Amino acid sequence: MATRKKVAVITGGAGFLGSHLSDRFLAEGCRVICVDNLITGNLNNIKHLRKNKDFSFKRHDVSKKISIPGTVDYVLHFASPASPVDYLEYPIQTLKVGALGTHNTLGLAKLKKARYLLASTSEVYGDPQIHPQKEDYWGHVNPIGPRGVYDEAKRFAEAMTMAYRRYHKVDSKIIRIFNTYGPRMRIKDGRVVPNFIDQALNDKNLTVYGNGKQTRSFCYYSDLVEGIYRMIRSKHSGPVNLGNPDEFTILQFAKLVIKMTDTRSKIVYKPLPVDDPKTRQPNISLAKRVLKWQPKVKLEQGLRETLAWFQGQGIGK
Ligand code: NAD
Ligand code: UDP
């Protein structure tokens, strides 16, 4: 007798990461139910899946009650605006999807006795005073600053996930994702990777915020998806940092984009957004130990592939 296919509900499945995760779960022989209200996502990201009989799309705001018929084995909660520009444009929706959306998706996991995975973020560490960041660091977040809508929503989401784990025995997992990039990011989503690519490919000056000495550590999407897949199958509940520890200043990153594109763009400096973290680098020793995972794709390689993808989408000359 054929074994039943596992069913994964992926919220935010029409977004950048959620669509890649959908691909991976389908490739692993699962059925995928993508739930997305398209606030920052795009149906183009899942266009190639629409004819796949194991894939279905449900347009729904997960801050409202969710009902899914039948068996569900995994719930992966990825719905949330993720770019600082997006979550500043949608502050209330961001708070709601981190709070109510997490509550609703945990309720779904509890009802279906499904394994639950929360996509948390390095932003729970805020503007960190410990470097690199390790999972036992409690963070340095301004709750009333503009980024608080995202940071505090994700911190609440982690607390809610732990409460459901302790009180309702939901088999939950928390991952803290550090800056991840790649194909299917929205070119205008405002994050530094698509911004610089858009600017470089259109010969516009690259907008470095502040003095460009702030750091980020960029992970290619394929490495992240592998880490997430290992996490959902592991016994470990987390939180576990997932990211690439190779750290760059934003100025170094701008220079790399200029070097890798045939551009006439120069660098211009713009004001640093309020509460922009000065440093960010994951300590991934826990992921290495419990998931036997570490990123493989170097920034230049991932950037080359991402540039090629955006050019294929008609971005630039
Ligand atoms: P994205 O904006 O491309 O995807 C988010 C998706 O969630 C979109 O498709 C959007 O329409 C959907 N969504 C938002 N609110 C919703 C709601 N109320 N109901 C249903 N769908 C909703 O961003 P992404 O980079 O793919 O991020 C996905 C998740 O990963 C987010 O939870 C984000 O916080 C987390 N994360 C991403 C990164 C990163 O570097 N990409 C880093 C840390 C955490
Ligand atoms: N940044 C920049 N120019 C841009 C966009 C972003 O210098 O056009 C900087 C931003 O201030 C931050 C870093 O790049 O220090 C990463 O920003 P992003 O929006 O990608 O995400 P964050 O890591 O801040 O969540």
Image: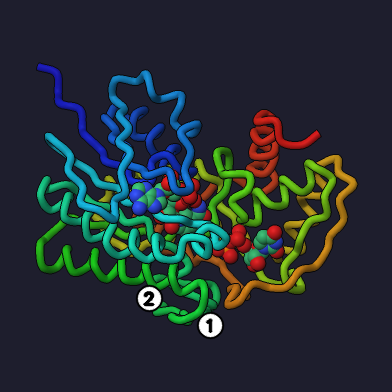
- Residue at (47% x, 66% y) in the render: 122
> Horizontal placement of 115 versus 248: left or right?
left
> Horizontal placement of 220 versus 175: left or right?
right
Question: What kind of element bears circle 2?
Answer: loop
Frontmost of labels 1 and 2 is 1
Q: If you read the primary sequence from the N terminus, does the residue marked by circle 1 or circle 2 appear first?
A: 1
- Residue at (34% x, 34% y) in the render: 25
Give the amino acid at mark 2.
Asp
Image location (x, y in percent) of residue 139: 44, 79
- Residue at (29% x, 27% y) in the render: 29
Residue 72's disc is none
Image location (x, y in percent) of residue 212: 74, 69
Image location (x, y in percent) of residue 126: 49, 75
Q: Work out which quarter of the rendered image holds the N terminus and state it.
A: top left
Q: CA distance from mark 1 to mark 2?
A: 13 Å
Locate residue 164: give its quadrant. Answer: bottom left
| Crowding at mark 2 (Cα within 10 Å: few <14, some 14-19, many 20+) | few
Give the amino acid at mark 1.
Gln
Tally of numbered discs: 2
Q: Work out which quarter of the rendered image holds the C terminus and state it.
A: top right
| Crowding at mark 1 (Cα within 10 Å: few <14, some 14-19, many 20+) | some
Question: What kind of element bears circle 1?
Answer: loop
Name the residue that disc number 1 marks.
129
Name the residue that disc number 2 marks.
136
In the image, the residue with mark 2 has its CB under 8 Å from the nearest atom of ligand 1? no
